Amino acid sequence: MTQAYPIQFKAEMKEKVWGGRALEQFGLDMPDGAIGEGWMISDHPNGTTKVINGEFAGLNLEDIRHKVGKEWFGTNSNIDADTRFPLLIKLLDCNDDLSVQVHPNDDYEKLPKGELGKTEMWYVLDAKPGAKIIYGLKPGVTREQLAHALENNEVMDTLQEVEVAPGDSFYIPAGTVHALCSGVVVAEIQQNSDTTYRLYDYNRPGLDGELRELHIEDSLNTVAFGDSGATYMKTDTAPNTWLTLAKSPYFHVEKGIVKAPWQLTTTPESFVILIVCEGEGTLTWENGQESLQAGQCFLLPANLGKYSLEGHCTVLRSTL
């Protein structure tokens, strides 16, 4: 039986019309082109990441599902050989504006077969001065007003914009209209889904030179008019303490700043995902050690037990 250890994966890189080369700063293996997304931990038909360390090297998350069960993934995970890993972890480089979009919830009747809804959160890793995001509708905007704005190319007048800085955190429940804009690099924790409905795309051609498809009816059906539950915050916190950034039915995300040796432990209820946002350090457990640097992501099995973080780095910790 393989002993539990922190698992690291080779990122799946996705070329996007809005992407760039900013993810190179993390030392990732990147193909040519405008790379918008690095899928760091993924168990989805559109991208399944492979292990690059330890005994499971060369296997992907689907393979691992068939080898280990709740002891590794946690009693809250409901993972078995036929159930995908519940979260999808990404790094995004927004060299240009993303489409204005919305994601459905789990109950939307027109979800593609096998897909989940998509609640997510962003942590801003880098942002150029003045960079912004679109984050929700202006107060009071109704379905009828949004539909009219879409018909008359006035949709930007209905949207709220928020200026962002490194360290900002945004919780984006399904139904929240949103868009990352140019000059922003984020870490994204989300439900394991690849379903996006585009409201507006700036009349911009895609990588094939054709206008990308819009999903107006699905978008209007899934927008949470009124309060979607979206929240955002600055994330200053004391060293070696956890600050809660997002708590949803799907994930719990915390931020920690490592300045001194920090003794931690996993629990039987959930795996832990660590995302290194900046700095460097060391992850140590009973049977080994891994160096940490910005841009790395690790999956810590629920049965790993005691581990420690050392060095000077900022990390996100995600659990179910």
Image (cartoon, helix red, strand yellow):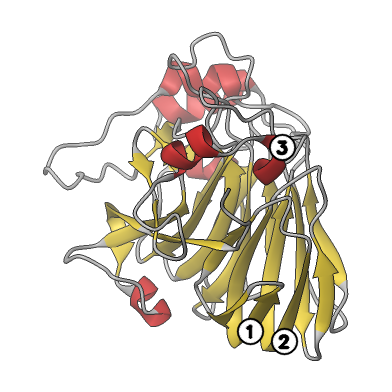
Numbered tag placed on residue 250 in the rendering: 3
Q: Earlier in the sequence, mark 1 or mark 3?
A: 3
- Mark 3, residues whose alpha carbon is within 10 Å: few (<14), some, or many (≥20)? some
Picture quadrant where residue 124 is located: bottom right
Q: Position of residue 40 (x, y in %)?
A: 45, 57
At label 3, the amino acid type is: Tyr
Picture quadrant where residue 202 is located: top left
Q: Is residue 297 left or right of residue 210?
A: right
Residue marked by disc 2: 310
Q: Residue at x 49, y 79 (%)?
A: 128
Helix, strand or loop status at disc 2: strand
What's the distance in space between the residues labelled 3 and 2, CA to CA? 29 Å
Instruction: In this rendered view, identify the residue nearer to me: 248 or 228.
Output: 248
Picture quadrant where residue 173 is located: top right
Q: Residue at x 44, y 66 (%)?
A: 53
What's the distance in space between the residues labelled 1 and 3, CA to CA? 28 Å
State yes or no: discs 2 and 1 in contact (Cβ < 8 Å). yes
At label 1, the amino acid type is: Thr
Helix, strand or loop status at disc 1: strand
Q: Earlier in the sequence, mark 3 or mark 2?
A: 3
Residue 27 visible? The answer is: yes
Q: Earlier in the sequence, mark 2 or mark 1?
A: 1
- When the figure is inspected, residue 147 is found, relative to residue 277, above or below; the finding is above
Q: Is residue 301 left or right of residue 114?
A: right
Q: Residue at x 44, y 37 (%)?
A: 62
Residue marked by disc 1: 282
